[in-house]
Image: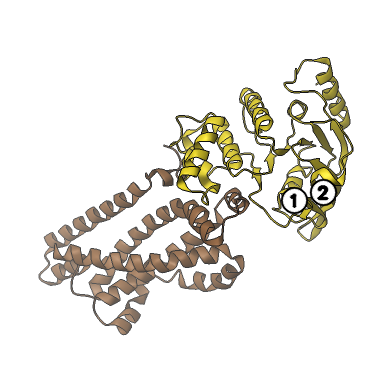
C-alpha cells in the first residue's frame, strides 16, 4: 500500500519486461502489445484501464501464462512464466464457473490433492467468506450473476494463489452488485493479502480499488501512465482527493469532465 | 414378446458398440484439429450411405443372423455418434479449458473433470437421436437379414396370408417402444449435473 513509485528488482513479485505481442490475423500481423514494462510488488493491488479492445485482456493472459509473448518476458519471483500455474489464478468476466458442479464442487475444484477433511474445511471457509452459506449444494444455473462471480473468486482463493488476475470480473453485473462486490474484494484483499491485478474499463472502479492504476493506450497497447492512488481504505468516494485522482485519470485517458 | 426382446437385444448391442467406439474416437478427433482434417473426407463419404445399403455386405460377412443385424445398427449409429462427439468437443467453452489448465490438471484429470462433463449434455442429445435411428434400422434389418424380431414379424405376417392385423400390431409396438426409448434418454437430460446444457424451460 506504500506510495513508493520506484520499485526495485528485489521486491518485485511480478515483472514484465519489454513485453510485446503480435498476432497473425488473415496473413497480416497485428501488434497488440508493445514494450510493456511493469513491476508489481508483493501484495499490491494493480488496476489496468484502457480503451476497450486495447489489449488489456491479452496482457492479463500473457501475465497468467495463457499466451506467450512474442517478445520480452514476464517473470514472477524471478522465474520466467511459461504457462498457467495454480499459484496464480485468473478469474474470468463471466461463465467461468463449472455449471456441472455445485457451489461446493466448484470451490473444491482445485483441492483434489487435499485430504477429504482438509478439503471440506477449506470449502466451508470460503463459502462463509464469500457469503454463499445455504447454497453449498446449489448448481450455478440457480445462482445470481453476483453469486457466480463470488463463487469464481472463492474457487480461485481456495487454492491459495499468490497472485489473483481478474479480467473485468464485475463487468456483467448491475451497478449495485458491482459496488458490493468491490467492497467484498477489498475486504478479502485486506485480510488475505494477495497480489491482485485487475483489468477494468471502469474508471471509478480503478480509483476505488487500486494502489496503482496502469493506464494503457489504444492498440497497440503501451503503458501510457501509472498513477498511484495514495488514499487509505475505506475510501470516501466523494472526498476531494478521490475526485482529484479520478479527474486526473480521466484526463490521462483523454476524457472530458462532463458527459 | 419374444420378438420385442430380440429387436431390443440387437439395438442394445449395435448401439452400445457404436457408442463405445465412436464417442471416444470422435472426442479425440475433435480435440486434434489435424486429425479431424485427415479423417473428415472419409467420414463425409461414408456418412451419406444408408445403413440399408450395407445389408448385402452384412449378410456376406456375417450370414443371416443376429450379427448381421447388429452390424447394420452399428453402421447406422456410428457416424451420427462420431459427428456428435466431434462437434461436442468444438462447442466446449474455451473458458472451461482455460480454467482446467489454470488449476494445473493432469491430462487424465482434465479429460475426466473438465472435458467429459462439458460434453455430456451434447452427447446425450446426440445419443437420443441416434437411438431413434437404431430403432429404425433394426426393423429394416430384421425384414431381410434375420428370422425374428419386430421387422420379421411384419414381413412374415404379410407373407403368411396377408395378416394385416399383425402388421399393424407390429407397427404399434414399434412406435410404443420407440417412444419409451426416447423417454428413457430424455430422463437423463434432467439429471442435475447435466441439466445446465439444455435451455431452461
Which residue sits at x=19%, y=62%? B4
The part of the image, by quadrant, that contains residue A6 is top right
In the picture, measured across the screen, residue B31 lies left or right of residue B79, that is: right
The chain that appears yellow in the image is: A
Give the answer, above or below, for where A221 lies relative to B124.
above
In the foreground, A92 or B141 = A92
In the rendered view, does B181 fall on the left or right side of A121? left
Rendered image quadrant of residue A156: top right
Q: Mark 1 lies on which chain?
A: A
**How far across and down, in percent of the image, does residue A215 sit?**
83, 36
Where disc 2 sits, the SS reads strand
**Does A126 sit above or below residue A30?**
above
Q: Give residue A122's position: percent from left, percent from top.
A: 52, 39
Which of marks 1 and 2 precedes in the sequence?
2
Q: Name the residue under label 2.
A: A16
Q: Taking A146 as reference, is A250 left or right?
A: right
Circle 1 is placed at which residue position? A62
* Mark 2 in CB contact with mark 1 (< 8 angstroms): yes
Provide residue A65's location: percent of width, then percent of height: 71, 53
- Residue B130 located left or right of residue A212: left
Residue B88 in picture, x, y percent from top left: 50, 56
Residue A216 visible in the picture: yes
Q: Is mark 1 on a helix, strand or loop?
A: helix
Chain B painted colour: brown
Query: Can residue B79 be seen here?
Result: no
Amino acid at each position: 500500500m506504500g506510495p513508493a513509485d520506484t520499485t526495485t528488482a528485489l521486491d518485485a513479485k511480478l515483472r514484465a519486461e519489454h513485453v510485446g505481442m503480435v498476432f497473425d490475423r488473415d496473413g497480416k500481423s497485428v501488434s497488440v502489445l508493445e514494450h510493456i514494462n511493469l513491476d508489481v510488488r508483493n501484495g499490491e493491488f494493480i488496476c489496468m484501464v484502457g480503451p476497450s479492445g486495447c489489449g488489456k485482456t491479452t496482457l492479463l493472459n500473457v501475465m497468467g501464462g495463457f499466451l506467450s509473448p512474442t517478445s520480452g518476458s514476464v517473470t514472477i519471483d524471478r522465474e520466467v512464466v511459461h504457462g498457467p500455474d495454480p499459484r496464480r489464478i485468473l478469474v474470468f468476466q463471466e461463465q467461468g464457473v463449472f455449471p456441472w458442479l455445485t457451489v461446493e464442487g466448484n470451490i473444491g475444484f482445485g483441492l483434489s490433492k487435499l485430504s477429504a477433511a482438509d478439503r471440506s474445511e477449506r470449502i466451508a471457509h470460503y463459502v462463509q467468506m464469500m457469503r454463499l452459506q445455504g447454497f453449498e449444494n446449489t448448481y450455478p444455473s440457480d445462482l445470481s450473476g453476483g453469486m457466480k462471480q463470488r463463487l469464481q473468486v472463492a474457487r480461485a482463493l481456495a487454492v491459495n494463489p499468490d497472485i489473483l488476475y481478474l479480467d473485468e470480473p464485475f463487468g456483467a453485473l448491475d451497478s449495485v452488485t458491482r459496488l458490493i462486490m468491490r467492497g467484498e474484494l477489498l475486504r478479502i484483499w485486506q485480510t488475505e493479502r494477495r497480489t491482485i491485478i485487475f483489468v477494468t474499463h471502469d474508471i471509478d472502479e480503478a480509483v476505488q480499488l487500486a494502489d496503482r492504476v496502469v493506464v494503457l493506450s489504444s492498440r497497440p497497447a503501451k503503458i501510457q501512465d501509472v498513477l498511484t492512488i495514495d488514499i487509505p481504505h475505506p475510501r470516501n468516494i466523494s472526498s476531494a482527493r478521490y475526485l482529484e485522482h479520478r479527474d486526473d485519470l480521466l484526463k490521462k485517458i483523454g476524457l472530458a469532465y462532463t458527459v | 414378446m419374444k420378438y420385442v426382446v430380440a429387436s431390443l437385444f440387437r439395438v442394445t448391442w449395435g448401439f452400445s458398440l457404436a457408442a463405445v467406439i465412436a464417442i471416444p474416437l470422435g472426442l479425440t478427433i475433435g480435440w486434434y484439429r489435424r486429425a479431424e482434417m485427415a479423417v473428415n473426407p472419409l467420414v463425409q463419404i461414408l456418412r451419406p450411405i444408408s445403413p440399408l445399403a450395407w445389408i448385402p455386405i452384412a449378410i456376406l460377412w456375417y450370414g443371416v443372423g443376429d450379427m448381421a443385424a447388429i452390424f447394420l445398427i452399428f453402421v447406422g449409429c456410428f457416424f451420427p455418434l462420431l459427428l456428435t462427439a466431434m462437434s461436442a468437443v468444438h462447442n466446449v467453452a474455451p473458458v472451461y479449458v482455460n480454467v482446467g489448465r489454470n488449476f494445473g490438471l493432469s491430462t487424465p484429470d482434465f479429460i475426466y473433470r473438465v472435458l467429459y462433463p462439458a460434453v455430456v449434455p451434447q452427447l446425450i442429445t446426440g445419443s437420443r437421436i441416434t437411438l431413434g435411428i437404431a430403432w429404425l434400422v433394426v426393423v429394416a434389418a430384421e425384414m431381410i437379414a434375420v428370422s425374428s424380431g419386430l421387422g420379421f414379424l411384419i414381413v412374415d405376417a404379410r407373407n403368411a396370408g396377408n395378416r394385416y392385423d399383425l402388421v399393424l400390431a407390429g407397427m404399434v409396438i414399434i412406435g410404443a417402444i420407440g417412444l419409451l426409448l426416447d423417454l428413457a434418454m430424455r430422463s437423463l437430460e434432467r439429471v442435475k449435473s447435466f441439466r445446465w446444457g439444455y435451455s431452461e424451460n
